[in-house]
Amino acid sequence: MLAVKCPRWLRYTNELQQRVTQASSSQINVRSSHDGQAVAGTSRRFQNGSGLSNGFQRQLGGIPVSSLISLDSSPPKKAKVVICGGGTVGIALLYHLAELGLGDDSVLIEQGSLGDSLTWQASGMIGGVQISKVAMDIIRSSVPLVEHLTAAGHDVGWKQCGSLNLARTRDRLTYLRKLKAIAEARGTECYMLKKDEVKDKCEIMETSDILGALWLPEDGVCDTFSLCLALLKEAIQKGGHATEDCILQRTIVQNHKVVAVETSKGIIECDYFVNAGGFWARKIGQMVEPHVKVPIHPAEHYYLYTHPVEGIDSMPVIHDPDGNVYIREFDGGFLAGGFEKVAKPSFEHGDLPENCYGRELHQDWDHFHVLLREMLHRIPIMGEAVLKNLSNASEGFSPDGNWIIGMAPEIMNYYVAAGLKSGSYNSACGIGQLLAQWIVTGHCVLDAYDVDILRFLPMHNNRKFLRDRVKEVPGRHYSLSYPFVDFESGRCLRMSPIFPKLKSAGAVFGQIMGYERPSYFIPEESEVYDGESDGEVEGPFRTSNTKTWTKPPWFNYVAEEYRACRETCAILDYSSFTKFDCWSKGEEVVDALQYLCSNDVDIPVGGIIHTGMQNHLGGYENDCSLVRIAPNHYMMIAPSIQQSRCGSWLRKNLPSDGSVVIKDITSMYTAICLMGPQARSVMADLTDSDLSTKGFPFFSFKEIDVGLANGIRAMNITHTGELGWVLYIPNEFALHIYNNLVNKGKAYGMCHAGYYAMRSLRIEKFYAFWGQDLDSSTTPLECGRGFRVKLHKDIDFIGRSALQQQASEGVKRMYVQLVLEDHDPEVDPWPWGGEPIYRNGQYVGVTTTTGYGFTLNNMVCLGFVRKFNSNNEMDFVTTEYVMEGSYEVNIAGVKYAASVGLHSRTLPTKYPEPQSNRYLATQL
């Protein structure tokens, strides 16, 4: 076998490039020619009941899985659950369904041969930590499962070697301290190491450029092929069915529900269908009518394997995120991979291969060279290793890099588990368990919005959008998760008609559900817009990225915007808010919404009511404002991120006879908020409507004329507690009204304001937002909204019984506002969400939303406080328990004292002078 020494690859000349290419081709030929010694070793491993140690059993001529496990030659004619896809997540789901008693009623179909899937030969690193609770719970569930299988006699190659997460920069070190704080609070053993301590954990590692590391001693590695084989064995022993060479041809739907699947081996009737196709998930979604949109695009992903190297058997897993690489011991040699900053899309024209072999691509040494250089820098001894194989396999990535899990909005019983990237071995076990429980119980046991398929819109499934985005997504895997991080690709996709004016006014944009939304404004760097010209002022398109853990560079700009919102007047773009119209011929819409909503929505015409839409456990599926336009017509306004979720929940629970009609009008209206004590004065110059408190009271609606435009839906509400109106404007009138507001506002010191100022306002006013503070597991009684629930009225609604029980028993967590007392925002790391909260030294919860309170002149944190008993189980919480405690918030390893409150604090009309001397109102 031709040996290629790694150091020679760094001296990259044309001659060496040619030699490396020849060497790589030679390796492929050797593998395909069935080297006798390799095949013999492989067969022995199989005969001993273990999977292939190198994961290439087909290429090496190993024994097929079907000879080790009794698979079905054809699937059963009927099953409760059909799983399409024999990768790691499909196998894990089959296993967990069997564990829950659905073994005989579950069938897995695989288009190729089980064991061929590339997810069966992944890197095999088990464990890790995440700030997100759902992600943390999912990945940490792999460790006890692997230990259980090992104890049951399965050789899955489990080795608890620990893992090191390295930091080359101070910002990375701060992030690792944040991870340690939350992981430790949740019970995961972890330690911060100094440079010399890092060297002690792995002597072969270069540490001269390392500032420190996070050490996770409970982490380990396994043989992913053997793990999948063990899960499959266990599932089949409990009655599960699995069939190879069974190609899905069509998913059959009746009345918006899957009733059967048609395969190359016959039709299977089913109650649930799970698209676990991974790389092929998007294509599988198109094999049903209506199409299920699974936004996945493949990109090249590399693993490097070497022959054994003496003395590395006990090395820990190395994660070097600043170098975008990871390295572990594998079969006595090295297994290394990475996530390059600029990835290469594969199969850009959409023609996916028919089987797993087609996913394996030619090695691009020029492209891989960037990662290779970092590997050799971190572990110099790799330079003396002999190359075994460089695998270039296509992996599917979602638009935001997170997993895609949950029930599709298009079809009621169609589930998806995709976008697992190369980490399927680690997350698949937990995802399989989550989906199995979801199917059996009918609800998700965790709040999983960050990974729920409902976070996407149909536009995210656009192939050209996915192709552009996938170049950026893999590199985000190891990038620092700074606050408000955003992508550079796929921008300027959804824009309100006033977008050009906002851009020329100095807007710095963030993206939400594809919408460009101003985060803040830098007007002194823009061309001043006088509100009179109808032409677009050319200017740069600026995106908001906060690349710091401390005081952000936009602080002073936001301070002035905040001041205008509270003292004069500000204009904000709310166009991204989710908007639905709901109506009926008679009273059907009232009855339907009464059943869906926990508040009494039978309000007078012209009224606005805030309400939740609860699930049967009492948690928030939707948090919205309902505006009664007419006796049989409501307008619903919800957070931007709920657009898909709102539509899906309404369609699922409204009458199936079509008596109630819903329409997504999000893109039909431009929403402009005029906020501040001078808002009435600005509006009065543009409308004949009575804007007095008596004529247009708070939480009311009128359809008014503004300027020369008519039919404007005006609402006396700002969603932040400040005075003002939100105008929902038909798009054709948006520029006209915006121009008039800007012109009239100059006399009152009006300025533009963005989302960051709005965020600070609502945090100080103790307003909870869905997706940040509220989720599908949060009830109104837990967040101080019991007064908005109609339990005292004889009106049934979804979740009523659960809330009645909670009202009688008590709650196990309470929503609180914490103001830090000894934190210096000028020099200390800021809280950005996810920080552990301690009461009397005991961990009781995490922060959900945080921000600087410009009136309180300090950092403000929102979150939930729990009470844990001696068995570490949640107990009932009382007001006295919450208020009598002494609180601290752990920010990157330092605990800061905080005062607690259960109600919004009384804020003075004016607030202390901001750090900046600029007053942006004069810039308009």
Image (tube, helix red, strand yellow):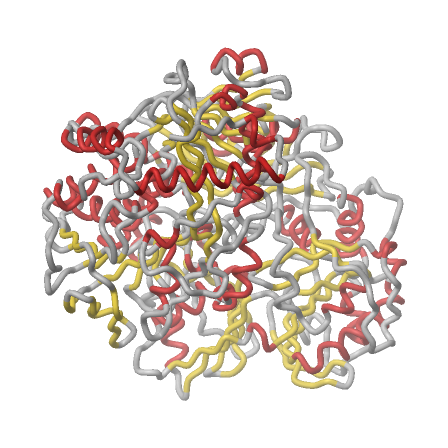
- Residue at image position (36%, 56%) is 406
Q: Say which of 850 and 40 sits in front.
A: 40
The spot of residue 424 in percent (x, y) is 36, 43
- Residue at image position (36%, 63%) is 408
Q: Say which of 234 and 60 sits in front.
A: 60
- Residue at image position (44%, 78%) is 662
Label total for image: 0
Residue 618 seen by the camera: no
Q: Is residue 656 above or below residue 463?
A: below
- On the image, which quarter does residue 921 sit in? bottom right
Q: Say which of 66 and 754 sits in front.
A: 66
Task: State left or right for residue 253 relative to residue 920.
Answer: left
> Which quarter of the image is occupied by the N terminus?
top left
- On the image, which quarter does residue 124 sit in? top left
- Residue at image position (65%, 73%) is 670
- On the image, which quarter does residue 850 sit in? top right
Residue lying farthest to the bottom in this orientation: 585
The spot of residue 92 in percent (x, y) is 26, 44
Task: State left or right for residue 485 relative to residue 25.
Answer: right
> Which quarter of the image is occupied by the C terminus?
bottom right
Q: Is residue 605 above or below residue 148?
A: below
The spot of residue 94 in percent (x, y) is 21, 48
Residue 543 seen by the camera: yes
